């Protein structure tokens, strides 16, 4: 199981968990949910206390990944399997992500 912290504009918004290659969970952090000034991270993941579950990486997060030659180059340089979307997301969306969302791996 791997986990990543999801930040919106530098504020911890929630936790994305990969329980297996076909089970993903996203849940907003309680403090973020309780703050009425904070909006949802995406239209497809409205701010709620329920857990979002999916059998694939949520499209919102998948769309943060590079495609084609850029993806191949990132995977080669980072030594990440090209089919490891979660690993690639954690490795590439920490600093130079487009937009307000950044992803940081949870280190045990």
Image (cartoon, grey):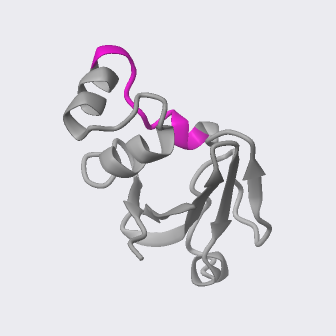
> Where does the image place residue 71, in percent across and percent down from the top left?
33, 25
Identified at 38% across, 46% down, the residue is 99
Which residue is farthest left?
A: 77
> Where does the image place residue 29, in percent across and percent down from the top left?
60, 76
Q: Is residue 92 above or below residue 36?
A: above
Q: Is residue 61 magenta-colored?
A: yes
Decide if residue 75 is on the left or right side of residue 107: left
Q: Quadrant of the C terminus?
A: bottom left
Q: How many marks?
A: 0
Identified at 44% across, 37% down, the residue is 64
Q: Is residue 86 magenta-colored?
A: no
> Where does the image place residue 24, in percent across and percent down from the top left?
67, 52
Residue 50: which quarter of the image? Answer: bottom right
Residue 92: which quarter of the image? Answer: top left
Identified at 76% across, 72% down, the residue is 49
Which residue is farthest right?
A: 50
Nearer to me, 54 or 14: 54
Which residue is farthest top?
A: 69
Q: Quadrant of the N terminus?
A: bottom right
Decide if residue 57 is on the left or right side of residue 69: right
User: What segment is highlighted magenta in the picture?
Assistant: 60-69
Identified at 53% across, 43% down, the residue is 61
């Amino acid at each position: 199981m791997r986990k990543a912290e999801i930040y919106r504009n530098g504020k911890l918004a929630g936790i994305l968990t990969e329980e297996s290659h076909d089970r993903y969970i996203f849940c907003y952090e309680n403090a973020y949910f309780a703050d009425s000034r904070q909006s949802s991270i995406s239209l497809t993941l409205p701010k709620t206390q329920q857990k979002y579950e999916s059998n694939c990486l949520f499209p919102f997060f998948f769309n943060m990944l590079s495609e084609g030659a850029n993806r191949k180059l990132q995977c080669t340089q980072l030594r990440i399997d090209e089919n490891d979307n979660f690993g690639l997301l954690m490795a590439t969306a920490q600093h130079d992500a487009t937009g307000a969302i950044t992803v940081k791996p949870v280190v045990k």
